[in-house]
Each structure stands twice: as structure tokens, then as C-alpha cells.
Amino acid sequence: METKLLQNVKKHIQLSEEEETYFVSYFKPISIQKKDFLLREGEICKFEGFVTKGLFKVCHYDEKGLEKIISFPREDWWVGDIDSFTNQKPSSYFIQALEDAEVLLISREDKENLYVNLPKVEKLFRIMGQKALIALQRRMSENLRKPAEERYSDFLEKYPQLLQRLTNLQIAAYLGVSHELLSKIRKKIVSKKII
Amino acid sequence: METKLLQNVKKHIQLSEEEETYFVSYFKPISIQKKDFLLREGEICKFEGFVTKGLFKVCHYDEKGLEKIISFPREDWWVGDIDSFTNQKPSSYFIQALEDAEVLLISREDKENLYVNLPKVEKLFRIMGQKALIALQRRMSENLRKPAEERYSDFLEKYPQLLQRLTNLQIAAYLGVSHELLSKIRKKIVSKKII
DNA sequence: CGTCTATTTGAATGTACTCAAAAGCGGTGG
DNA sequence: CCACCGCTTTTGAGTACATTCAAATAGACG
């Protein structure tokens, strides 16, 4: 599974063979079962992880108990709570495996050491952060004042592969609509396609 | 105005006096008048800027012509379109001054050079990016399924100083509600406070 | 003073939510 | 193999929230 990490990293920075080995040595592989938590609200996030297999949800619950899903980290993505991780403060999120998963973890101290010993990595994480920021910004502005039906069809277009791996409950929590409405929207879209 | 930039930077990385001078030499101060554009949709963003005075809006217009405001960069903030800037592709945003403003600009080439000649800067922009990401993530998840009235009072709490510098039209475009509804919400809140 | 823009107000319409109940579906144990 | 349980999905009725459109009022600025 380290290979997957390196493939991904090499898209952004170049590493010599020794550097590759060194880089990878910082990460500890773990397995995690469906429904288990990588992080719970209130805990301090002690790791950052690269997902090599499986699917997670990052979520939290508002005052009324409504689940809100921030993202679905999966293969070839990074997982963690940057805020809690970098500022060493209690997380406001849960990170839960939706499928059996495998992750390569790096601790905060190790990451700081890695920055010092292999400064290229600074660039790597700068780029990763930028990418995440760009994607989130787009999602944010696209969702402003956009009706639920469009948000759902946008989702379908963007993540067709994800559909089969999620329940409608989860998609609704991600889109920010009630699952009842989502169900009605799905029905409507199907009938449109038949016509 | 360079002093403001350094004050801000020194919160995140340490620089020697020579390094400070060197760092600052990369930035070109410009003045820009109210209503003028720093960037227009379709243009490639050739700079990143640090605002030392004034207020901007970053926005775009959807198919129906509705304005959607992404952010209000102002004193002590960075301004630009990272996506367009780093990937050299046409921007999907307008950046317009809402007040007479002053900005310190750095070009893409210069920023790359700066990374090479003063690697600490890599860390600086990694941290800046992380902060932006964290803030945006919070805004995103907080707005999911939250009624307009709460979004507005959240805004009041977070940015009380901004209120007097913005029109309701602009706040509405930021919150993602019609300005008519915003007006009604304001009325409602005032009457609540009187009681 | 007149012009342009921002703000308020109201009525009608549409969108989305809550609540409640039923139907579907998968897994588990008898 | 079937019965039962828990969870997801669907459906409908009623209500709340938000939008559109239109028009009146208020403010800012040359």
C-alpha cells in the first residue's frame, strides 16, 4: 500500500529512491473496520492519514442532532482534521469508516520532523492544501442558493462511482437536505429520464 | 505598508532582518479605487496580494445572473484566485474593490523564485492555506441546512465590524439569500431586541 | 434637484421541512 | 427456511421557510 502513496506524491514533487524510502518510513499502516472511528468529536487528532483502501465520512451533529457530512475521504485521499491536528485542539468532527479500510498514518511530531529533514514535503502539503481549498471553495459557491435538485444532479455527475457506496441518508447529509426530500428528488429525476 | 505585511508574516515564520528586506522586495505596492477590478472572470490571475488597506469582494454570477460572494478580503488578508494563479487557467471570479484600497502584489514567477531562494516561505503559504481551508470548512458545514436567520446572526457575531462597510445586497449574496428576505430577517431581529 | 441605488413591504408561488406511517431489504437466530 | 429485527427508502399531508415580482420609500451623490 506504500506504493499507492508514492504514486500520489510523485504527481506533486520529485523524490530520489532513498528519499522515497525515507519518506515512506514515516507512515504506519493500519487497518480499520467498517463502522469504527478514526477520530471522535472532542479528541485531539494525532495523525494525518493517506487512505489506500476503503471509504470514510467526516461529519458532525448540530444542536438538533442533524448529521452534517463534510466529506467522504477514500482511496488516494488524505484524511484527518487539519484544524485539530495542527492546532492541537479538540476536534469538532467524527471520522468513521463506511467500509473496511486501510490507512497510512503519520503523527504530528513525525510530520514536523519530516518537514525539517525533507523540506520538499513542505511543498507537497502546500499543494495538497491548495487543492483541497480550491475544491471546497467551488463546492461552497456552487451550493449557495442552488436548489436541492441541482445540487443532487451535480453530485451525480461529479461522483458517479460514489453513489453505490453510499446510502441516501449519507448523500442527503452531505448535500444538506432531508432524506425525505432527496427520495422525492430521485423519483422525479427517474421519471424525467423515462420520458 | 510593507510593515503590515511583515507583522502578519512574523506571526507564522521567523525572518532575519536581511530576509525581511529580501522578502518584502518581491512585493509591489499598488493603489486601487473603489469599484475597480483587481481581476475579472476569464482573466488569468497573475498575482497574489496582501491587502494593507480597503475592502474587496470575490464573487461570480451564476446562470440566472445571481451574484454569489465567496469572501470579503480586507486589511491583513490575502487576496487572489489561487486556482487561476497556481494553475494558470482563466478565473471564474471577479475581484472588485468595495473601498479605495492598497495591496502588495507578487507575481507567479516571483513567488516561485521566492520559494526557491527563501524556502521558509513555503511554510508560510502552507500555513496560510491551511487557515483558509479550516475557516472555509467551518463555514461550509455550519451553513448546511441552517435557516437564513441563523446564518445572518452568525455573520453578525463573527464580523460585527464588517457590517457598516457592506450593503445588505452584498451580505445577502454572501449568505446565499435574497435581499428581500434579508431585509425581513433584519426587521424581525430588531423587533426581538426591543422586546 | 433629479438620478441611481439600496431598502422595505406585501402578495402569490414554490421549495423544503417535519411528522407519521408504510413498504422494502438484509442479516440473524430459531 | 422462515420470522423477526433494525435500518433504509418511500409516500403523503400539513406547515414553515424562502423566492419572485411589483411597487413604494428612503438615501447617497453629483
Image (cartoon, coloured by chain):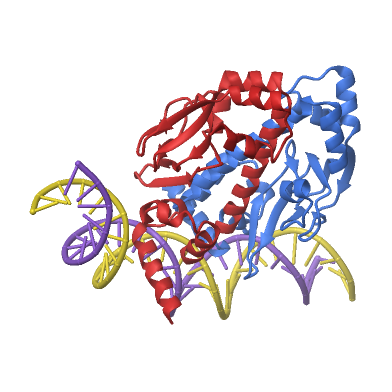
Chain colours: A blue, B red, C yellow, D purple
Residue at 82 percent across and 56 percent down: it is A36
Residue at 52 percent across and 30 percent down: it is B104
Residue at 65 percent across and 36 percent down: it is B9
Q: Nearer the viewer, residue B42 or A96?
A: B42
Give the image quarter of residue A168: bottom right
x, y percent for residue A47: 83, 45
How many circles with numbers are drawn on the protein? 0
Q: Nearer the viewer, residue C23 or D2?
A: C23
Horizontally, is A180 left or right of B123 in the view? left
x, y percent for residue B78: 56, 37
- Residue D16's place in the image compared with B45, above or below, is below
x, y percent for residue A10: 75, 23
Residue B39 seen by the camera: no
**Residue found at the far bottom of this picture:** B195
**Residue found at the far front of this picture:** B17
Give the image quarter of residue B76: top right
Residue at 52 percent across and 50 percent down: it is A152
Residue A189 seen by the camera: yes
Q: Nearer the viewer, residue D12 or A93?
A: A93
x, y percent for residue C23: 60, 69
Horizontally, is B2 left or right of A120 in the view? left
- Residue A1's place in the image compared with B108, above or below, is below
- Residue B21's place in the image compared with B69, above or below, is above
Which of the image's four quarters has the N terminus of chain A? top right
Q: Nearer the viewer, residue B99 or A121?
A: B99
Horizontally, is B36 left or right of A150 in the view? left
